[in-house]
Amino acid sequence: MKSCLIVDDSKVIRKVARRILEDLSFATEEAADGRDALEQCRQAMPDVILLDWNMPVMSGMEFLSVLRAEQEGKRPVVVFCTTENDMAHIRAAIDAGADEYIMKPFDRDVIEAKLAQVGAL
Amino acid sequence: MTTPDAGFDCLSSLLRTRAGIELARTKTYLVESRLGPLARVHGFVNVSEFLQRLARDGIGEALATDLVEAMLNNETFFFRDIQPFDLLKERILPQLRTARAASRRIRIWSAAASTGQEPYSVAMLFAEDRESWEGWTIDIVGTDISRRAITRARSGLYSQFEVQRGLSIHRLMAHFEKAGEHWELSPEIRAKVRFQPLNLLGPWSLGAPFDIILCRNVLMYLAHACKQEVLARIHRQLSPDGRLVLGAAETVLGVSDAFVPDWQNRGLYLPAGLQPPAFARAV
């Protein structure tokens, strides 16, 4: 079973995403900000990270920069999932090492399609 | 005095004669959901009353068109069911590049283009392999019975929801720009496709035969006799060594002898009599 870390400061978004991902046969964990997510990744690197952009303590971009700099061996698939929906943000995310990008609001079809495109299903 | 059945029969007859679509009586829920907005526009509180009035008073041309368009399923998305596009990219287009090396011309028809995502997806495949197609004339035609869908297709504007269905973020970045709340296709991709309204059961004027015809998720809604007629007409519009692509839930088996399945590639059909794969021999 593949694992996914859901990183979002919204409890509601985490709950919705968790239901979708568990329905797609992922084992899920949650983090409410980038620092919490980084600590969890250092303990056990997930296969996929669903990552919000704007979060307290450490943003999604800061988290991604540190993650890609630190990671050795296993390279998790990182999918941004954010309300930032302009081309500048998308380019910045891809340049920083994101593999895919979901613009909120999302549904099951979008998450499934995006994960399929990066071979994460 | 008209009955609810008379209203349904009136609509059913209209769909059959105009679009070849068989509307089963079990689909009343579909009628309710798709015609509700149109009924309200015409001042009716529910679809049943609307249809009964139409059955009693008759239907003018403009309203008949609106009714048929409202009942159509315009579901589509970019690179829908990715397998046919992988097949185009990896096998069919390379084979055509060799087979058509003399004319350097390829014609592709998306016969039920809806709001344009299918033919634009094909256009992206060519744009993403630009060097290989330098100096070629690639003619991609998108047609649909719905004039409203064709108008949207020509606009090249899609919602955030639409661009996230089937498009990778890399393709979005390569081929789109944000335009207010929408995403606008690049002029390069839009210029590769021309659209025109076309009823598959009506008169056609599409010019020279096509090398590839995509007619996906259309036959499944048609009455058997209409399927036969459409396939016969498509056969006449396809090059002798062309390829027909149907939807994953569709087949020619039991419908037409004019095509045979390419057993190695689900959804792909060859004109009967062609020793497959003619393109492959040319590679």
Image: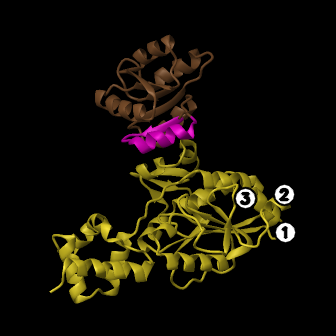
Chain colours: A brown, B yellow
Q: Chain of mark 1?
A: B
Q: Amino acid at mark 3?
A: Leu
Q: Which residue occupies the extreme front position in the image?
A: B254
The answer to whether the residues at label 2 and label 3 have Cβ atoms under 8 Å apart is: no
Q: Which mark is residue B283?
A: 2
B187 inside magenta stretch: no
**Does B276 sit left or right of B116 as displayed?**
right
Residue A37: x %, y % from top left: 43, 18
Query: Which label number is shown at residue B93?
Result: 3
User: How far is the residue under mark 2 from the one under mark 3?
Assistant: 11 Å
SS of the residue under disc 2? loop
| Location of residue A74 with respect to B211 vertically, above or below | above
Towards the viewer: B120 or B40: B40
Q: Which mark is residue B102?
A: 1
Residue B47 found in image quarter: bottom left
Residue drawn at 81 percent across, 71 percent down: B103
Q: How many marks?
A: 3
Q: Is B82 displayed left or right of B38 in the figure? A: right
Point 51% across, 49% down: residue: B166
Q: Is residue B246 above or below residue B161?
A: below
Q: Which residues are magenta?
A: A100-119
Quick one: label 1 or label 2, which is nearer the N terminus? 1
Write down the chain letter for disc 3: B
Look at the image and tell me whether residue B58 can be seen: yes
Q: Look at the picture and state if B220 lies above or below B206.
A: above
